[in-house]
Structures are given as C-alpha cells and as structure tokens.
Image (cartoon, rainbow, N blue to C red):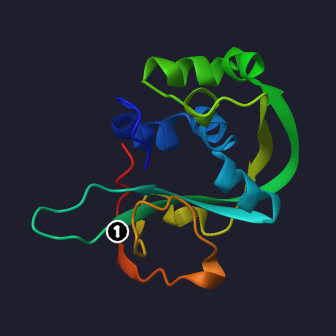
Amino acid sequence: MPEDGNLRKILPRLAADYPDVFNAYQSTQPVKVEAEMLRSKYVASFIGLEKRKGTTEQTAVFVGLYKVGEHRPITQEEFWNVPAHQQLKEYGMQRDVEAHPRPSVLWFDLTITDFYKQWKGKLVIEWPRPPIKRSRFASKAKFPIHAILEDSILL
C-alpha cells in the first residue's frame, strides 16, 4: 500500500473506476520489485486494507491478475509526462524515481486477464508478515483467504 499522500485513500477507487490510471501506477516499481517483475510472467495485484484496531493482522483485496509483457526503460522526464502519472502526482504520488534518483525506471506492459475477474474487490486475503513488504512470490508465502464478499469494497 502506498504511503504517498492521499494516494493511499484514492487507490481503491482508481482500481474500480479508472483501471488505466491504476495500471499506470503499478507499471513502474521500486528497484527490488522491478527485479522481481523481470522474473515474473504474471502479477496478482492486491491493495492493502487498513488494519482493524486492536489487531496486527494485515489484509489485502484482490484487484486482478495481470500478464507481464514487454518492459522498457523510461527517464524521469518521460515518467512524469505520462498523463496518468501527472494525475497520480496530484494525489501525492512520489515514486522511486524521486526518492532514489536513477537515470531510468522500467515500464512494464501489464495486461489484465480474465482470471477470477468476478472476485475483483471481493476476495480479501491475509497478507503474510512482514506486512511492510509490498511484493511476494506466491510460491514462497501463504495467502490465506480472509473473506469473499458479496459486493466489491473498491470504492
């Protein structure tokens, strides 16, 4: 889940109503996640949910399964010239390109699949510890189902 300004609050709505903007958000990643994506064929996208008071349990809601296609480097200038990134910046997005400047970041072409698309916003999983880690290989962690909801919680 992003720590960037209002983006944390607006990300579920972007996933629900503005999938192209959400996809632009996840198409570039910090260095460690970038390296993991280079080895991946698919990315299961989840948004972390707020912890309930009195619990350390972290949960996340399913957005979709994306096929990882080609990737290409883009400069910081190209990054911020993407209209969706300009919109995300209005919500407070600060990406790795600013926190840890480097000449370029990789842009991944991600394509949503039909895999369990009916569970978008409805499948809630328990996120393995430590919850601060944003990405995981499915083969190296367990993701117990916390709930399957009748209605989407993406607003």
**Residue 10 visible, this angle:** yes
Q: Residue at x 37, y 39 (%)?
A: 8
Q: Where is residue 148 in the image (x, y as percent from the top left)?
A: 38, 74
Q: Going 81% across and 65% down the picture, which residue do you hit?
A: 39
Which residue corresponds to the image point at 32% horizontal and 67% vertical from the top-left? 58
Name the kind of residue labelled 1 in the image.
Answer: Leu
Classed neighbour count for the residue bearing mark 1: other residues with Cα under 10 Å, few (<14), some (14–19), many (≥20): few
Q: Closest to the observer: 90 or 146? A: 90
Image quarter for residue 74? top right
Point out residue 12 in the picture as x, y percentages from the top left corner. 42, 44
Image coordinates of residue 104 in percent, x first then y, are: 79, 31
Mark 1 sits on what residue?
149
- Residue located 61% across and 83% down the image: 140
Q: Tell me if I can see residue 113 in this picture.
A: no
Picture quarter with the C terminus: top left
Q: Position of residue 84 (x, y in %)?
A: 62, 24
The mark tally for this picture is 1
* Horizontal side, residue 116 vs residue 71: left or right: left
Q: In which quarter of the image is residue 85?
A: top right
In the image, farthest residue toward the left = 54
Q: Is mark 1 on a helix, strand or loop?
A: loop
Is 24 drawn above or below residue 49 in the view shown? above
**Does residue 47 appear left or right of residue 43 in this picture?**
left
Q: In this view, does 80 lie above or below 116?
A: above
